[in-house]
């Protein structure tokens, strides 16, 4: 049996708040540390021989329910992250892309996102996708409406797949940190045959060493896709 190959990795980064609380810190400190973990994990994926895309869940369509101050902090942090990260993207040949409904963000943040996408669009060692104001149901609904708008009366799975915002490819492995074992409206369509891995590690404590161990575990799995 050949080794199971990891091309598209998806990560639900969870546990920033609990990480901070355990230390008597504000939740926002957990988000700051979490941003450093994204950097480390992204660099590790860029070096990996088979990983082509890593999609990180950074802000869900449900996260607007959080206190206004926390939401504002996350928006500011995202802007700063993208500004600081440009050099890493260029040095490590990483392409940046965003998925989700960006129209809810400030004009300045939308501009930063578009510029970062544009400046990194020719990089090829890894595509890092950040899911921002993203919801799996919203993405599927939007895709179906796009197809209706094109005049389609009947749609195929291929039509939906190609109308989705996520540069189309199925997820091979989904990792969720912090011990929660749910999908929370992430990539519902693309996860249909993904392998799932749940770790109790809180996102700010997650390391490239643990990632490599999880990838080794994944590579030993036997994916049958309904066959035998
Ligand atoms: C994940 O950590 C980051 C975001 C959802 C933005 P949380 O903020 O959900 O951390 P916990 O789950 O409260 O510990
Ligand atoms: C999922 O985490 C969303 C992100 C990681 C961005 P949440 O912490 O928001 O999910 P629930 O509410 O625990 O399911
Ligand atoms: Mg959480």
Image (cartoon, helix red, strand yellow):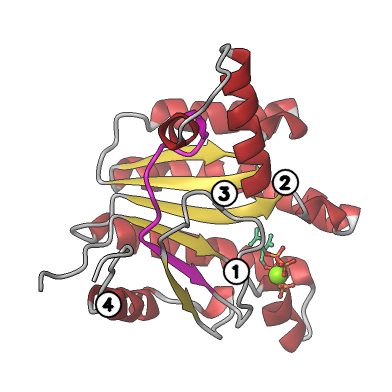
Bounds of the magenta span? 163-176
Q: Position of residue 93 (x, y in %)?
A: 28, 43
Q: Residues within 10 Å of mark 1 (few under 14, many from 20)?
A: some
| Residue placed under numbered mark 1 in the picture | 33
Q: CA distance from mark 3 to mark 4?
A: 35 Å
Q: Position of residue 113 (x, y in %)?
A: 57, 33
* Sooner in the amino-acid sequence: mark 1 or mark 2: 1
Beta carbon of the mark 3 residue lies under 8 A of ligand 1:
no
Q: CA distance from mark 1 to mark 4?
A: 31 Å
Q: CA distance from mark 3 to mark 1?
A: 12 Å
- Magenta segment, prevailing SS (helix, strand or loop): loop
Beta carbon of the mark 2 residue lies under 8 A of ligand 1:
no
Instruction: Identify which residue, 196 or 69, lies in the foreground.
Output: 196
At mark 3, the secondary structure is helix
Q: Position of residue 129 (x, y in %)?
A: 47, 45
Does the segment drawn in magenta span residue 50? Answer: no
Beta carbon of the mark 1 residue lies under 8 A of ligand 1:
no
Image check: 13 left or right of 63?
left
At mark 1, the secondary structure is helix
The residue that appears at 57% across and 74% down in the rendered structure is: 204
| Residue placed under numbered mark 2 in the picture | 75
């Amino acid at each position: 049996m050949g080794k199971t190959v990891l091309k598209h990795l998806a990560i639900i980064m969870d546990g920033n708040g609990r990480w901070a609380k355990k230390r008597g810190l504000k939740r926002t400190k957990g988000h700051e540390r979490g941003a450093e973990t994204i950097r480390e994990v992204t660099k590790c994926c860029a070096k990996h021989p088979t990983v082509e895309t890593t999609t990180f869940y950074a802000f869900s369509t449900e996260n607007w329910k959080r206190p206004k101050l926390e939401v504002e902090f996350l928006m500011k942090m995202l802007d700063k992250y993208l500004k600081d990260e440009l050099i890493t993207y260029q040095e490590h040949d990483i392409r940046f892309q965003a998925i989700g409904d960006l129209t809810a963000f400030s004009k300045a943040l939308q501009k930063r996102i578009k510029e970062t996408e544009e400046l990194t669009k020719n990089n090829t060692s890894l595509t890092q996708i950040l899911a921002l104001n993203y919801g799996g149901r919203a993405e599927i609904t939007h895709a179906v409406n796009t197809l209706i708008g094109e005049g389609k009366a009947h749609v195929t799975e291929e039509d939906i797949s190609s109308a989705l915002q996520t540069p189309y490819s199925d997820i091979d492995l989904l990792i969720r940190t912090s011990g929660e074992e749910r999908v929370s409206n992430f990539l519902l369509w693309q996860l249909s045959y993904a392998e799932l891995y749940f770790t109790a590690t809180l996102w700010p404590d997650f390391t490239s060493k643990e990632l490599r161990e999880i990838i080794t575990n994944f590579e030993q799995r036997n994916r049958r896709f309904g066959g035998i």
